[in-house]
Amino acid sequence: MQPHAPLPPSPSRPLRPARLLALYLLAPLLLILEVPVALHVANRPETGLTVHNLTIRTVAPGGPADRAGLLSGDRLLALDGRVLDTQVDYHTALADRYDLAPRAYRARRGGEVFTARVEPTLPARSRIIWSYGLSLAGLAFLLMGWLILSRRSDVVARYFFGLCATFAFFLMDVPDWPSPWYMTLKEIARDLAVMLLPVIFLRFALYFPDRTHLTPRTRARHRLLLLPAIPVFLLSLYAEAARLDPAESRTVAVLQQLAGLYFLTYMTAGVGVFIGKMFGRDRPLRQAKLRVAFGGLVLGFVPFILGAVLHNIGGSVRLPYQDWYGFSLVLVPVSFGLAILRYGALDLAYVVRHGLVYTLLTVLVVLTYTLLVGVLGGYLAARFHGSDLPVVLLTVVGLTLVLNPLRRRLHAGLERAFYPSRLATREAVQRLVHDLAGLSGDPEAPRSMLARLHDLYRPGHVALFLAEDGALVLRAIHPEPPSPPTAAASLPTASTLGRVVLAAHRPVYAEELEGLDTADQTDAPTARLLAELDVQLVVPLISGRELRGLLTLGPKTGGALYTQADVANLHGLSVQAAALVEVARLQQARLERERMETELSVAHRIQSHLVPRAPLRAPGLHVMGRMDSCREVGGDYFDYFTQEDGSVGFAIADVAGKGVPAALVMTSLRVAFRARPPPAARGRTASSRC
C-alpha cells in the first residue's frame, strides 16, 4: 500500500478587522460599562414609576410616586425645575443621582398642571434580585457570544454574536451620565440596536445552525433585508436632532408606527423560519439542534416574560420565587451556544446529563463557599479580630483546583446511576480497541472490527475504506450487500469527503458536509458514495496529517441519530484504528522491501554466474576479469571464451541504465554474443590465432 501525498490543511482565515473590534473592543467595553451599574443596583433610588416619551406608563401601588399622587398617563413637564422636552432630558436629569432627596415632578393631567413631591426609597429586595438576574443574563449573552465568535468565524457565529451583544446592551444597561451629549449618543445607540435587532435575528434564523457558505448572489439578496431599517433609523436621528415632542409631533408618531411594523414583521418572519426548520424532516441533525435551542428559548423567555409582567403590575399577584425568574434568560444563550459549538446530534440525554452535572457543581461550589467564607471566615474574623480575606482567597484557590476533578467525578457518578447503557457501550468500545491492538497483524482484523461495530450500533452498514495511490478504496463492508457497490468502490482522496474529514479531524455527519466544505457544492464522487451506501456518519482514520482511511456508517435501526456519546466513542476508536492501518501499511511496505531484496539477491547471484569466474589461458595469452556492481544487479558486462576454431573472443560492455532493467539487457547480450559473435564485434586479437 503506497501512502498518498498528504492533503493540505484548510488555511485558517485571518481575523477580520470587524471581528477583532467585536472581540477585543465592543465586548470588553460593554463589560466595563456594566460595572458601575452593577455596583449601584442595591442603592439606586426607587421612585415607583416608569416613563416613556415623557408620559408616565406605570405607577407601582404604594410606591413613592403613588404616595405623591402621580397617575399613569400624566405628562411630565419638568424635574426639579429642569424643563423636559424629550425623553433624553428626563434621563439626563436623573443621571448619576443616587441620593434619597425628594424630587419635584411638574406634570400635566388633562388641562391641569401640578407639582408632585416624590420621596425616593431604596429598592426592595425583589427589585434587587430582579436587576441582578437581568445583569447576569446579559453577561451570559455577552460571554457566550464572545466564546462562539472567538472559536468560529463563519456567518452563524457572526450573527449570533450580533444578537448576543444586542441583548447584552439592553439587559446589562449602560450607565447614565448627566451630559446631554452623552445621553443623546446613548439614545442613538439604543435606537440603532432596536433597528438592527430584527434583521440580525432574521438572518441568524436563516443560517442557524449550519455552517452556511453563501454565494455572492445570496449574500447580496440578504443584504437587502437591511433596507427598511435605514430610513426608520434616519428618521429617529432627525427626531433626536430636532428635539421633537413625542406626544405632539406627527413625525414621531409615524416613526414609531413604522418601527413597530418593521420590528413585528421581521421578528415574526424569523420565528417562522426557525419553526419551519425545526419541523423539516430532511435534516434530522439540524432538527435535533433546533429542538435544543427551542427548548432553551421557551424555558428562558417564558419565565422572564411572566416575571416582567408581574413586576410591572405590582404586588397584587405573586408567584413563588418570581423575583428569580430573570435568571432563566441565561438558558437562552447557553442552549444556542451549545447547538452551535457541539457537532453531531444534541440528544436530550446529553443536555440533561450535562445540565445535572453543572447544576450540582454550582450547588456544591455555593455551599462550600458559604460554609467556608460565611461560617468559618466569619468565626475566625470575630475570634481573632481580623479580616476574612485570607479565607476567601484560600477558598477561591481551592475551588479552582478541585473544580475539574469534581466535574469528572460527577459525570462518572451520574453515568453509573442513571445511564448504565452509555457506560456499557463505552466499555465495549474500549474492549474493541484493546482487542484490535492484539490483532494488528491479522488480515481479518478489519472485518472483525466492522462486525463488532455493527453489533454495537446496529447501523444499516459499516464500511472500511483505505487509502491507496491517491484514492480511498473499499476494503470491507458489513453486512455484505447482495451486489458489490459500484460507485462506492473507490473515492478520490481529494474529493469533498476526503477534504472535509481531514480538515475537521473528527467524525462528520453526512448532513454536515455541505456546510463544512468550502466549495459551492458537493462533488459527484462523494454524492454517489453517500447515496449508494446511505451514509449518515463518516469517521476518518487519520495518522499525523494524512488521511489513511474512512469508516462509514449508515442510519441506525429504528431511525435514531448517533448521539454525542456515540461520536465520542467512535472518535476514540478511529485513533486506534488509524494506528492499526498505519502499522499494516508499514508492515506491508517492509514485506515488499524484503521481497525485493530477496529477489535482487538471487538475481545478483545469477548474474555473478553469467560472467567468467576463472581466468582464460591460451598460448601467449592470459585473460582474467572481475566485476563489482554498485547495486545488487546492474548493466556492466564482460566475457571471454575460446571459440571452436581456437580463437579467443572477449567483450566489455556497459548497458545504459541501472538496476534490474539494465541487468536484463546484459543477460540478453551475453546469450547473443556467445551464440555467434558478429564479425564487426571482433577485435584485432580475436581475428588472429594465438
Image (cartoon, helix red, strand yellow):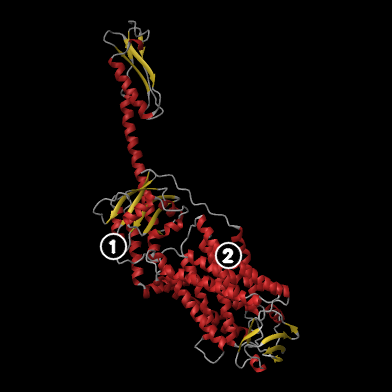
Relative to residue 359, is residue 653 depicted above or below? above
- The amino acid type of the residue labelled 2 equals Leu
Residue 285 locus on image (x, y percent): 40, 65
Lateral position of residue 314 relative to residue 585, left or right: right
Give me the disc on residue 227.
Answer: 2
Residue 48 locus on image (x, y percent): 63, 88
Which quarter of the rendering shows the N terminus? top left
Residue 344 locus on image (x, y percent): 41, 63
* Residues at marks 1 and 2 touching, judged by CB atoms closer than 8 Å: no
Q: CA distance from mark 1 to mark 2?
A: 56 Å
* Location of residue 453 by image quarter: bottom left
Which label's residue is closer to the chain start, 1 or 2?
2
Residue 665 locus on image (x, y percent): 34, 24
- The amino acid type of the residue labelled 1 equals Asp
Give the residue displayed 27% in from the left and 7% down from the top: 645
- The kind of secondary structure element at disc 2 is loop
Lateral position of residue 378 relative to residue 471, left or right: right
Q: Which circle, 1 or 2, is nearer the viewer?
A: 2
Lateral position of residue 589 relative to residue 293, left or right: left
Residue that badge 1 annotates:
455
Q: Residue furthest top?
A: 689
